[in-house]
Image: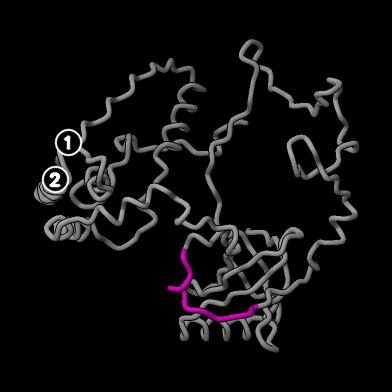
Amino acid sequence: MARAIWTGAISFGLVNVPVKLYSATSPKTVRFHQLSGKTGARIRQKRVDPSTGDEVSFEDIVKGYEITPEKYVLITPDELDALDPKATKTIDIEDFVDLSEIDPIYYDHSYYLAPTAGGAKPYRLLLDAMRESGKVGIGRVVLRSKQQLCALRPTGDVLTLSTMLFGDEVVQPDRLDELDVVSEAAASERELAMAQQLIDSLSSDFDPTKYRDEYRDRVLDLIERKAAGEEIAVQPTADEPEPAPDLMAALEASLAAVHSGDEDESAPPKPRKRSTSASASKDGAAKNGSGRRKAVGDGKNAKPSAAKVKK
């Protein structure tokens, strides 16, 4: 059973909705420990004072902010505690905005909100009202002693809260010097038409279940095989495909590959050339004719479970 990580209330106007907060994601990262290559023992890290070489105990460590090279301002825990945001137990909605106005770059982590005892009716009211209006609630919440900007929105029959980055935490693209040449690199009408045709050919409804972390699957398969005593032969790295002679050739080759795949989806994928100058050709070359990516090693019916990985 899922375990709540926060309990409080949603506050909008004078209405309070008592809720519990649950993690909405569970990243499947394969984690490794550092071991000694000679003994196989796990490496332990120590905190060492480089000026003396002595190990420093945790209670003797203080926080310092570097203002110039090797010059620090020391900050005590009491000074930081005095500045901590008030640990309120409310999600304070300040504005309602259209979902389309929020660039996904601002989203950070996602959580589900569920009603607590006595909160079902106001929860359902807020859920239905937000769904009908198409609006997203923007507010603030304090999680783990840190004030977070957040977006509250209906997702099916549940309210979803996404913590967000503040405006000054997102790097503006005008700081990228390489974008200066983009305005001078306009494509021809024919190239644009072919690129749109390629996008249409590869378009489909978003289904998150058809995408897998193929690298993680291969890593877990490698771990399971080595744990079973199998000797692994390292395969040579495949050569990079040669770039297409030009942008138009890359578009034509991508469209031809799509149409060829539509005629025979059962045929194995053939190597295709990619253009280094067009992202559209990269997408086309990486997918098969039906717009679905071929999974590496999909001839194996059983995928190793992450639960079998021993740390």
Classify the position of the C terminus by image quarter. top right
x, y (%) of residue 268? 18, 37
Q: Is residue 282 above or below residue 125?
A: above
Residue at screen point 65% across, 75% down: 115
* Residue 75 in the image, given as x and y percentages of width and height: 85, 48
User: SS at mark 2?
Assistant: helix
On the image, numbered disc 2 is attached to which residue? 257
Quadrant of the rendered image containing residue 296: top left
Please tell me which residue lies in front, 59 or 301.
59
Whether residue 214 sits left or right of residue 86 in the image: it is left
Which residue appears at 49% of the width and 27% of the height? 223
- Rendering coords of residue 283 (x, y %): 27, 48
Q: Is residue 98 magenta?
A: yes
Q: Residue furthest bottom?
A: 14
Q: Is residue 14 visible?
A: yes
Q: On the rendered structure, is 307 left or right of 196?
A: right
Q: Amino acid at mark 1?
A: Lys
Seen from this angle, which residue lies furthest top? 38
Residue 31 in magenta stretch: no
- At x 85% / y 45%, what residue is drawn? 74
The amino acid at mark 2 is Ala
Q: Report whether residue 163 is seen.
A: no
Query: Which stretch appears magenta?
Result: 93-103
Residue in front for this viewpoint, 308 or 138:
138
The residue beneath circle 1 is 270
Disc sitting over residue 188 in the figure: none
Residue 9, quarter of the rendered image: bottom right
Determine whether 20 is above or below 266 in the image.
below
Left or right of 83: which side holds 23? left
Determine crowd level at label 1: few under 14, some 14-19, many 20+ residues with C-alpha closer than 10 A: few
Disc 2 to disc 1: CB gap under 8 Å: yes
